[in-house]
Amino acid sequence: MQRRTFLAGAAATAMLRAADPWEQLPAITKRIQAPEFPNRYFDVARYGARPDGKSDNTEAFAKAVADCAKAGGGRVVVKPGEYMTGPIHLKSRVNLHVEAGATLRFIRDPKRYLPLVFTRWEGVECMNYSPFLYAYEQTDIAITGRGVLDGNANCEFWWPWKGRTNCGWKKGDVNQAKAREQLLAMAEKDAPVSERLMGEGAYLRPQFIQPYKCTNVLVEGVTIHNSPMWEIHPTLCRNVTVRNVKIATHGPNNDGCNPESCTDVLIEGCEFDTGDDCIAIKSGRNRDGRRVNIPTENVIVRNCSMKDGHGGVTIGSEISGGVRNVFAENCKMDSPNLDRVLRLKTNSVRGGVLEHIYMRNVEAGQVSGAVVDIDFSYEEGNAGQFKPVVRDVELRNVTCKKSKFGWTLVGYAEAPIRDVRLIDCAFDGVLQPNVARHVQEMKLQNVRVNGKAVTS
């Protein structure tokens, strides 16, 4: 059975290569359409919101959202000023529009993010603190405008829960480690999600923006600072657009945009300067990811810029549900604190099929690690029974002026990385020899490393 599955996958890969996979882009793009909203406006000031940087405006936002949804949809408008608030839960047909000069600053008291909501935390479903901007099973939702979303996290609030001494935490302080282990253990035993109660005493930080099981999602124009954890985390969503967003935040696990188990996603024109991966494509972790078993597919990343981060475009590590059809093009990356251009990370505990991943026309000034990194030894390493599959990965016209490696590709002897193609690529300023272990069908075509041609 496994051999038939592999042969079928290989045949599909060969067909895609023959037809040029980028020809799929117009059809995918056509399906990804930003939601439209009725011409109705609900100014939060009419509901008692005060832009004084002190008042708690949570109730005013909730009332404005409820009235907007009840009327059939429209814009909840936030005028210039500084608004303190707790969590905001969006409803169908509601566009939260934060005007230029407006800042939403989120209250630091964790109790304000109760009651618990259904969420996914590091790829595992559970009941946890509400994300700051959250929607569950809604249709046509948006967060737009040129204003600022400030999570108000720092090395005194939220970030120390990670348990790292470089950001406020010291031995003896509370941290997430125990609850994280408990959550993973519950998931391995298939405990019902309703019994996976986190929240107070667990110290699992909430995400900033999380639409969950939503259809037709738009995040556009806003600037995001100081998130407790992941910034934009659409989960089990369909038809997602993230456009012209600016993210600058360097806390622990401050990934920029993490579509997880989503279909038809467009990330374009965004700026990332992050404390973790700029873009991280995910699909659930370990047994829980295989239980849900929904891949992320049809993701387009274009015209983005990446500064600091662990990876510019990353796939994994919570990738047990698999990923396919990722297209990244026309991006610019440049920072001594950006580790990689393209990164795939998994292991035999996570597993997953990662296939049909394409990058073209990407310019990198410098990265600190490898231009392309595929790593099967991430975290637990080869300690499980779910050998990952990585196949059909192509970089075309990707350039980098300085890096430690051109590529580091490390698979397993019993589960090699397959069909990696570098075409018309130039990597200069490479400091160490490239690494390719347990890789089959690697093709180098018109590739130059430090000015010298390299062949397969």
Image: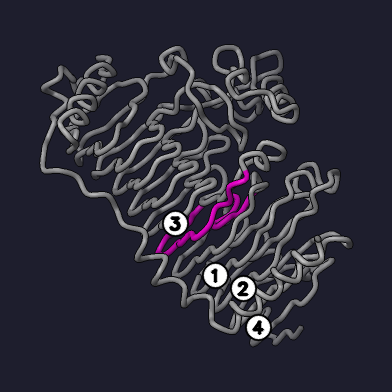
Q: Quadrant of the C terminus?
A: bottom right
Q: Secondary structure at mark 2?
A: strand
Nearer the observer: mark 3 or 2; the answer is 3
Q: Are marks 2 and 1 in contact (CB under 8 Å)?
A: yes
Q: Is residue 61 above or below residue 78?
A: above
Marks 3 and 2, Cα distance to the nearest angstrom?
20 Å
Q: Mark 3 vs mark 2: which is more N-terminal?
A: 3
The kind of residue tagged 1 is Met
Q: Are marks 3 and 4 in contact (CB under 8 Å)?
A: no
Instruction: Using the image as rendered, state which of residue 277 and residue 128 is in the foreground.
Output: 128
The residue singled out by tag 1 in the image is 359
Residue at 86% in and 44% down:
383
Residue at 63% in and 75% down:
428
Q: Is residue 335 above or below residue 37?
A: below
The residue singled out by tag 2 in the image is 394
Q: Which residues are magenta?
A: 293-316
Marks 1 and 3, Cα distance to the nearest angstrom?
17 Å
